[in-house]
Amino acid sequence: MNNINLLTVTSIMLVTTCLIQAQDVAPLKLGNVWVYDYGDGILGRGEVVDSSFIVDSIKYFGLAEGYFGNDRALRLTGANYFVMKEDSTFPEPLNERIYYKKNAQLGDTWQINYGHPVPAIYTITDTFPAITFDTLVTGKLLNENFGLVEWDYVWTEEFGQLSQLNWLGELQYYLKGCVINGRVYDDTAFIVSGIDDITSFLSYELFYNYPNPFNPSTTIKYNIPTEGNVRLIVYNSLGEVVGELVNE
């Protein structure tokens, strides 16, 4: 793990995105698999490999993402929220982050405290019929509002998260194939036999900085698979380069 401490004289909201991020998935069942296409030949994979993963005396599903093993703990709460267990510094009850609501309806909303002065707001802003893997589903547009920037995610009850769009409306990643309840959808060759061939691509990870906003310093954590040159560039909400923090 590489921890980069960055100093600045201006208080700003720094928004970071991940090449391969902690994937939010549903439905949670042992053996379910999701494969996401991030573009440029980069693929990410998550698989539910444990249905009784215990953290702080609470039972979770263990999600392996192809390169760290059981590095994610997820569960469905009694209030029908899908949550992911974060580290001990995450400022929400039980250090859990809500990422979706089962059977979410238009207008459903929740908020998450990431340690910012203003919480992030999540809202189901649209529902629509869609064909996914030759299956008629109801797509649900989940808007993530951080105040300065917004992200949109398309979810379904059947397959989970289908895609992510950034604040410019650009596609960041999409669901390429999956295994749900024992049935394989779409890119079966990759799901069944191809994962070992691409694990070297799956070890790059950039985390949200903390605190955010900050004054005068913040910490950005990232993982890289081997030693090499790293460039870390900050963009504003218009997609313009604010500065290059690391190039070494």
Image (spheres, rainbow, N blue to C red):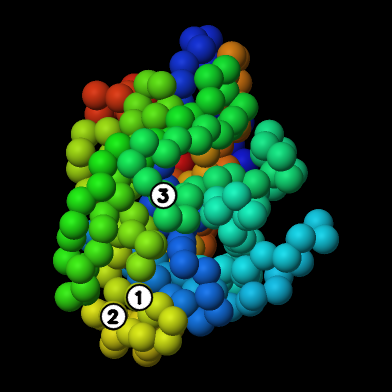
Q: Is 221 located above or below residue 103 in the figure?
A: above
Q: Is 149 located above or below residue 38 in the figure?
A: above
Circle 1 packing at 10 Å, graded few (<14), some (14-19), many (20+), is many
Comes first in the chain, label 2 or label 3 = 3
| Residue 78 lies in quadrant | bottom right
Circle 2 packing at 10 Å, graded few (<14), some (14-19), many (20+), is some
State yes or no: discs 1 and 2 in contact (Cβ < 8 Å): yes
Question: Disc 3 designates what residue?
Answer: 104
**From mark 2 to mark 3, how far is it between C-alphas?**
23 Å
Circle 3 packing at 10 Å, graded few (<14), some (14-19), many (20+), is some
**From mark 1 to mark 2, how far is it between C-alphas?**
5 Å
Task: Point out residue 198 in the picture as x, y percentages from the top left corner.
Answer: 38, 76
**From mark 3 to mark 1, how far is it between C-alphas?**
21 Å
Query: Disc 3 or disc 1, which is closer to the eye?
Result: 3
Q: Which mark is residue 178?
A: 1
In the displayed structure image, the side of residue 225 where residue 95 appears, left or right: right
Task: Point out residue 12 in the picture as x, y percentages from the top left corner.
Answer: 47, 16
Amino acid identity at mark 2: Tyr
Question: Disc 2 designates what residue?
Answer: 185
At mark 3, the secondary structure is loop
Between residue 79 and residue 227, name the one nearer to us: 79
At mark 2, the secondary structure is strand
Task: Point out residue 6 in the picture as x, y percentages from the top left corner.
Answer: 56, 26
Q: Is 111 located above or below residue 162 in the figure?
A: above
Residue at 62% x, 41% y is: 3
Amino acid identity at mark 3: Ala
In the displayed structure image, the side of residue 49 where residue 182 appears, left or right: left
Amino acid identity at mark 1: Cys
Q: Is residue 167 visible?
A: yes
